[in-house]
Amino acid sequence: MQNIKMSTKRLYYDDAITREFTAEVLNCEPASAAASETAAAPLRSPAALGVAAGLRGAGQSEPLGNALWHVKLDRTAFYPTSGGQPHDTGRLGDARVVDVLDEEDDEVIHIVDKPIAIGAVKGIIDWDRRFDHMQQHTGQHVLSAVFHSRFALTTVSFHLGSDGCTIDVRGREPTQEILDSAMTAANEVVYADRAVNVKYGSAEELAAAGVRKTVERGGTLRAIEIESLELQPCGGTHVQRTGQIGMIFVCGVSRIRQDWRVEFACGRRAERLAREDFATLRAVAQRLNCSPQEAVAAAERVVAEREAHFKNARASVQKLAEMDARAYMQEVQVGTDGLRVVAKLFAGEPPEYVQSFAREVAQAENTVALLVQIESGQIFFSQHPSAKKDMNALLAEALKHVPGKGGGSRDSARGRLAEPQNALEFLVTSTALLRPNLSS
């Protein structure tokens, strides 16, 4: 079939609210064949990359399995992925539109799940998806304009995802005060229900009209004008008035290399976030036995109490470990080499207890502690400096025989066994390495 090359008339440029349209199918071919002809511009769709296995053979007109087809129309209302905005979905006749591509020759490629006959076809846009994208994209224009005009923060990129939206802004750090102020100002534009218009002109004409971001392209350019706010080159779909955005909610900010990534949501997404957040707040308040308005203060009290209890528990564990260590050392005899070696396995006691035990043991002269916590496989080596051994070197040598990781200093070293069940073997090995002349 002849591959027809011509620009696709884009209905969404002037009318983004069109939900249904009719067009002429100019070409329909298997996605694998189309991919071979446009190898210099590979397909974006992962599904479209592997469709050859789903075709019966060259020239076959019926799809098998997950085969996809490329369809070119003389005009379309389907928006292709571009400028941070995802593609539309919907139907062309009986075929489902799963992806839309923007070709370099100004053609729009519709990727569908079944072949379509040459001739007239009816297209139906998935309106819920389209309107959601219109709300997010127009909201982004408003938010970017406010950041630029009020805080000298320039938007360098925009991403509209299935769950969240982000803009990357360049300049000073957007503090919480700036974020709150920008959100308030952006929503004032929303509530004012200003007109959103489409303008056309050359780069020079748009620059003279006060476009926010200049572009270096020839020919006629398309720009979006938000009444009394901004003029911005853009090929995306937008609502007709700012009131249709619903609301703009700024979720947070994070550092991205030299820029700042601002997360936000508009319209139905903002409504969903607010509903989910309040449901969470209400559930937390119920658990804390307080009103939602008191939840933060109640949570702070709970955290403070928990930290106090933790400190008390840790102090109690430390005191108990010290007492147990002193009692245990009374049962350990000094060896013929002049050292008292406390080599012990611990089961059930927390690592904090074992660490305090080792520290207390090392307070006695000529004493070394070789301790292992069985459940976690954690290792605690410690000595009084008068013992004149090297705990770090001893740990490294022992781990050559029983695998694990660790390190430390001459008087104290910590580690963890790769397999905690080898704790006894490790302890026996460590003791033998420490006192080679006494090992049998």
Image (cartoon, rainbow, N blue to C red):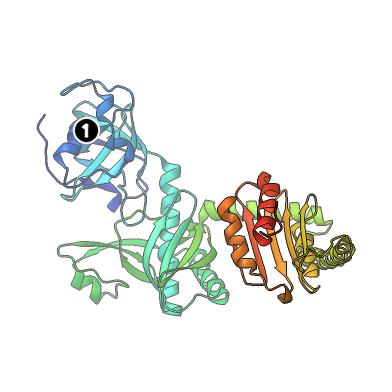
Task: Give 142 or 325, whichever is nearer the viewer.
Answer: 325
- Frontmost residue, 52 versus 267: 52
Which residue occupies 71% across, 48% down? 424
Does the rendering let one see residue 433?
A: yes
Image coordinates for residue 390, horizontal then vertical, percent: 63, 69
Q: From what the image shows, is residue 205 above or below residue 78?
A: below
Q: Quadrant of the N terminus?
A: top left
Residue at horizontal 81 percent and vertical 68 percent from the top:
311
Q: Residue at x 32, y 73 (%)?
A: 212
Q: Residue at x 31, y 41 (%)?
A: 45
Q: Looking at the picture, does residue 217 appear above or below residue 283?
A: below
**Which of these two is toward me, 436 or 107?**
436
Q: Quadrant of residue 43?
A: top left
Report the side of 206 relative to 403 (left or right).
Answer: left
**Residue 212 against residue 37 in the figure, above or below:** below
Secondary structure at badge 1 equals helix
Q: Position of residue 147 (x, y in %)?
A: 44, 73
Residue wearing tag 1: 32
